[in-house]
Image: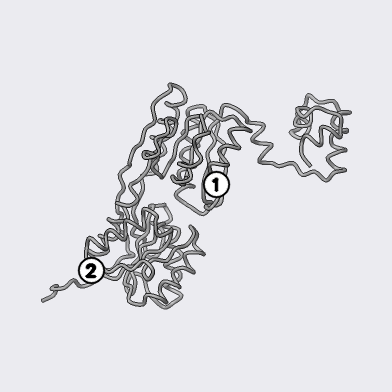
Amino acid sequence: MTIKDIARLSGCGVATVYRVLNRHPDVSEETRRKVMGVVEAQGFQPNGNARRLKQRSGGGIAVIVKGSQNMLFADLVERVQRLLRAADRDASVSYLDEDADEVACALQLCRERKPLGLIFLGGDPALLQREFAPIRIPALLLTGSAAPLGFANLSSITTDDEEAAYQGVRFLAEQGHRHIGVLGAQPDSSRVLGCQRACLALGLPFHPALQHEPCRYSMAEAYAAARRLAARCRELTAIFAVSDVMAVGVIRALSDLGQRVPWDVSVVGYDGVPLAGYLVPRLTTVRQDTQYMAERGVKVLLDMIERGGAPVHEVVAFRLVTGESVARLSLPGEGL
């Protein structure tokens, strides 16, 4: 049952049905009773999200968030919405599963809402490469690089994930850790590749099938993955989690296994979300500059919309924030 079906059965126009469902005052009582009679008889449940999109159609910015468990995205969404409100721009937010097709969602929103611009949070560059071409409005990819894609209407603001992960592993090596596990993401992700590159450059052993455990971005998934990794690779003295959310699951799993962080196993996270500063122990993490990313991203997108600006691709600086979750091990030659 669709809105068009309700219109046909009630003898009213589609626009009239929308007005009735959205409780507009400019509908006669007779028409309202006719439409609602069909709605009740057919057991129709209006889609609240679709109704809100229709109410706010045209002229806004559509924000597509890929992954509902990612705390970094929650921080970015809040900042982006605040900045867009300050610029007198409406924003609608669509949350997708991390395995969903964000470009298909964007195309549907373009058809239904006709937004002035799009913001992708957590977009997959490979998927964008294959499917983005039909999108003609200005768009922005946050936390990923669209520079190699070459689309004239797609900008990107991101952290160099591979280099940031490299520096996280390098820090662990500087603290004397030689057996380091990596938890989260897929083997070809930039963060995992950065960890692997660091191990190779620093002369540390790294066997992906042994030392890397993929998982989805959630505490529960990370908890289970950490237990698998710990059982498979008992000589690990440190784990690099590719997000702070995952690091929470890792620390809980290690505790349940009787391993103390950082005395038995050290943990480094990634993102620098506020939660990291309140964990016990306080998490050492690679912090992304969400304030700058949001401000710069919104400015770039609005410039493309309002002035036809050229696409911008910018890499934002990161910072390693040392907490209490990494222990220093004795290096060869120390204490002699």
Is there a contact, CB below 8 Å, between mark 2 and mark 1?
no
| Residue 283: quarter of image | bottom left
- In the rendering, which numbered label is found on residue 101? 1
* Residue 300 found in image quarter: top left
Residue in front for this viewpoint, 4 or 134: 134
Residues at marks 2 and 1, CA–CA distance in whole angstroms: 42 Å
Residue 308's x, y, as percent?
Answer: 43, 23
Q: Amino acid at mark 1?
A: Asp
In the image, 300 versus 253, the foreground residue is 300
* Label 2 Cα crowd, 10 Å radius (few <14 / some 14-19 / many 20+): some
In the rendered image, residue 181, in percent from the top left (x then y), is placed at: 35, 67
| Mark 2, secondary structure of its residue | loop
Residue picked out by circle 2: 176
- Residue for point 69% across, 36% down: 51
Question: Height in image: 238 above or below 112?
Answer: below
Task: List x then y, in percent, for residue 133.
Answer: 49, 35
Residue in the foreground of this view, choosing between 133 and 232: 133
| Residue at position x 66%, y 36% in the image | 52
Residue at the (43%, 61%) spot, across then down: 184
Q: Amino acid at mark 2?
A: Gly
**As displayed, is residue 242 above or below residue 33?**
below
Q: Quadrant of the N terminus?
A: top right
Determine whether 27 is above or below 131 in the image. above
Q: Position of residue 6 (x, y in %)?
A: 82, 36
